[in-house]
Amino acid sequence: MKHPTTTPKLFSLKSVAFFMAWLMAFTALGIMWGIYFHFKAMDQRAGEEMARRVSVALKVELQRQEDIIEEYAYWDTAHEKTIATYDELWVEENMGQYLLNRYEYGFTMVIRPDRTPVFMAKPAGGTVVFKYLLEHGLETMLLKSRAMATDVPVVSGYIQLLDGIYRVSTCPFVDEITNRPRKDYAYVVFGYKMDPNHVEALAQTYELPGVHLLSKPDDDKPLHPLINAKGEAIAYLTWDTPHSLQGMLPKLFLTVVGFFLFMGSIALFILKRDHANRDQYEEQLYLQATKDGLTGANNRRHFMELARQEFAIHKRNERLLSVMMMDLDHFKAINDTHGHAMGDKALVHFSSLCRGSLREADIFGRIGGEEFAIILPDTGLPGAELVAIRMRRLLEETSRNPELGLPPMTVSIGIAPMDENELFSTMLAHADTALYKAKNTGRNKVVTHNKEDES
């Protein structure tokens, strides 16, 4: 009797199960390795982004300090009260204790060309020594400033003093009419102490976790050097390195086999959220770098950049454009009579009026002190005069409103239209000439530039 033939089994159930188990294991391992390197790359990019954010934060803080010292360098009254006729009470209220309290500076001073201080203001218990300051970098900064060919030769750097690291900025007094350093080359100097409280505030403001100071470099930590006037690193900022891999990998290991597609969706969501936060953060840094901290108007540098671009476009396309230069009348009297805080309030009120009265295309900026400027695209002289008259009347009327608690205020305005054959600097100079004519003929008026003013 013959037995029926049977087809031999190529794979047993056990071998199939074994193969599937290994296949799933290798698949899970491959996914884990992919996720591991993905998050490792994310940590590396996050570390690079953190270093960039620290650098940008320090630049924004330095820019803010340089903007403030520029404002005081342009202030004729500051030069008069500190160099020409020293007024101790005025200095204390406007450049001494006022700056120490408002901006938390470690010291402020004005020095003569012979390197002797007119005065030095510092907090109670401060150990800033003028001679030590000169020997450890300030002398080099003053020499660099004097050698610069720019209108406002601001020099900044970090200096190691007896009680810590200071971020120091210096600038000579500048003549408001010539926009050049005064011949006596008297200097304003501001110093901000980089103590742990400041670094902690920096970390909170710019979302920089774990940022702190180091006196010596550490090869195991990310570093940003603080450079002195000679180009030497005198201290370092370091911060916590992101380690998303350590926190995510154990959880991913438990869930990746059955839910790796779901995990991919979660990772994509996290990346999108991180990108959105980064865009918001960069927008915040942009505003801090381009806007005046007190009034919210474009700061001097950004206004000039936007104005030059607008001038070039309108000149190339043969379109109308006008510029207005504005200066609050008797602003020194407001500060002297009502105090610096009331002066700040007056500046904010005027800036708010201007921005509320302008078109979206108009460019508004604070040039320095109580001086502002406006670029009016596609606007000829008649239209610019209407805008100027409206602003002059609006300021005069609103400042008399008792509910606002402001002193009476007026503004002088100079207007210049764009001429197809002139340069941007010429148009600004024409508006400035018209402004000074308004100031010298009674104030609280609008004056337009004409050819007779050039003769």
Image (tube, helix red, strand yellow):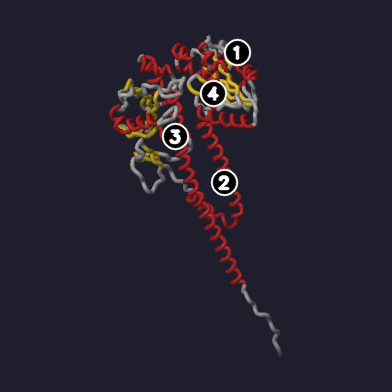
- Residue for badge 3: 202
Q: CA distance from mark 4 to mark 1?
A: 24 Å
In the orientation shown, which residue stands out farthest toward the front?
Answer: 455
Which numbered disc, 2 or 4, marks the residue that appears first in the sequence? 2
Q: CA distance from mark 3 to mark 2?
A: 26 Å
The residue mark sitting in front, 4 or 1, is 4
Amino acid type for the residue under numbered disc 4? Leu
Question: Under tag 3, what secondary structure?
Answer: helix
In the orientation shown, which residue stands out farthest toward the top?
Answer: 442
Question: Under tag 4, what secondary structure?
Answer: helix
- Residue for badge 2: 271
Decide which of 214, 182 is in the foreground and name it: 182
Amino acid type for the residue under numbered disc 3? Leu
For the residue carrying disc 2, how many other residues have a C-alpha within 10 Å: few (<14), some (14-19), or many (20+)?
Answer: few
Q: Position of residue 429 (x, y in %)?
A: 52, 22
For residue 443, side relative to residue 163 (left or right): right
Amino acid type for the residue under numbered disc 1? Arg
- Residue for badge 1: 393
Q: CA distance from mark 3 to mark 1?
A: 42 Å
Query: Are circles 3 and 1 on residues that touch, CB within 8 Å?
Result: no
Q: CA distance from mark 2 to mark 1?
A: 53 Å
Q: CA distance from mark 3 to mark 4?
A: 38 Å
- Any part of residue 192 in sight: no
- Residue for badge 4: 428
The quarter of the picture where the N terminus appears is: bottom right
Which numbered disc, 3 or 1, marks the residue that appears first in the sequence? 3
Residue drawn at (56%, 28%) of the image: 307
Quarter-wise, where is residue 254 in the image? bottom right
Question: Under tag 2, what secondary structure?
Answer: helix
Q: Position of residue 268 (x, y in %)?
A: 59, 48
Decide which of 93, 231 is in the foreground and name it: 231
For the residue carrying disc 3, how many other residues have a C-alpha within 10 Å: few (<14), some (14-19), or many (20+)?
Answer: many
